[in-house]
């Protein structure tokens, strides 16, 4: 990766993702967000954060240390 691109990534700690959800998943997230007066994006980020902190078997087989 060129040095300039590497520097640009370091300056921006946020990363944008694109995911596809079923209608049911989206509606469930929208309901949670509305009930708590937050955005759907906030609900997704919070869910990811909690999943990463939990002791989930899936993450035991993935090596995030490198």
Image: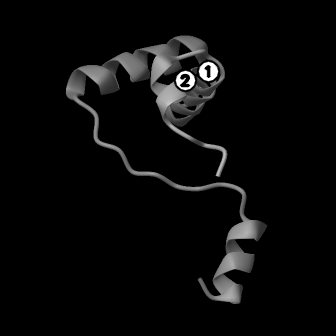
- Residue in front for this viewpoint, 18 or 35: 18
Q: Residue at x 48, y 30 (%)?
A: 61
Q: CA distance from mark 1 to mark 2?
A: 5 Å
The circle drawn on residue 7 is none
Give the residue number, with chain letter if any, for mark 1: 50
Q: Is residue 29 left or right of residue 48?
A: left
Q: Element at badge 2?
A: helix
> How many numbered badges does the structure rendering display?
2
Can you give x and y, in whole percent of width and height, for residue 49 in the image? Answer: 63, 28
Farthest-out residue, top: 35
Farthest-out residue, left: 23
Q: Compared with residue 4, is residue 6 higher up or lower down, i.e. above or below?
A: above
Q: Residues within 10 Å of mark 2 (few under 14, many from 20)?
A: few
Determine which quarter of the picture holds residue 2. Answer: bottom right
Can you give x and y, in whole percent of width and height, for residue 23 in the image? Answer: 22, 27
Q: Are marks 1 and 2 in contact (CB under 8 Å)?
A: yes
Q: Residues within 10 Å of mark 1 (few under 14, many from 20)?
A: few
Q: Residue at x 35, y 44 (%)?
A: 19
Determine which quarter of the picture holds residue 47. Answer: top right
Q: Element at badge 1?
A: helix
Q: Residue at x 48, y 15 (%)?
A: 32
Q: Residue at x 59, y 56 (%)?
A: 15
Can you give x and y, in whole percent of width and height, for residue 56 in the image? Answer: 52, 17
Q: Is residue 20 left or right of residue 49?
A: left
- Residue in front for this viewpoint, 50 or 20: 50
Can you give x and y, in whole percent of width and height, for residue 30 in the image? Answer: 41, 23
Quadrant in the picture for the N terminus: bottom right
Q: Is residue 1 left or right of residue 27?
A: right
Q: Is residue 27 left or right of residue 41?
A: left
Give the residue number, with chain letter if any, for mark 2: 47
């Amino acid at each position: 990766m060129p040095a300039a691109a590497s520097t640009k990534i370091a300056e921006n700690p946020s990363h944008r993702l694109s995911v596809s959800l079923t209608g049911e998943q989206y509606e469930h997230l929208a309901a949670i967000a509305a009930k708590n007066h937050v955005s759907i994006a906030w609900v997704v980020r919070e869910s990811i954060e909690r999943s990463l902190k939990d002791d989930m078997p899936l993450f035991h087989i993935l090596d995030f240390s490198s």
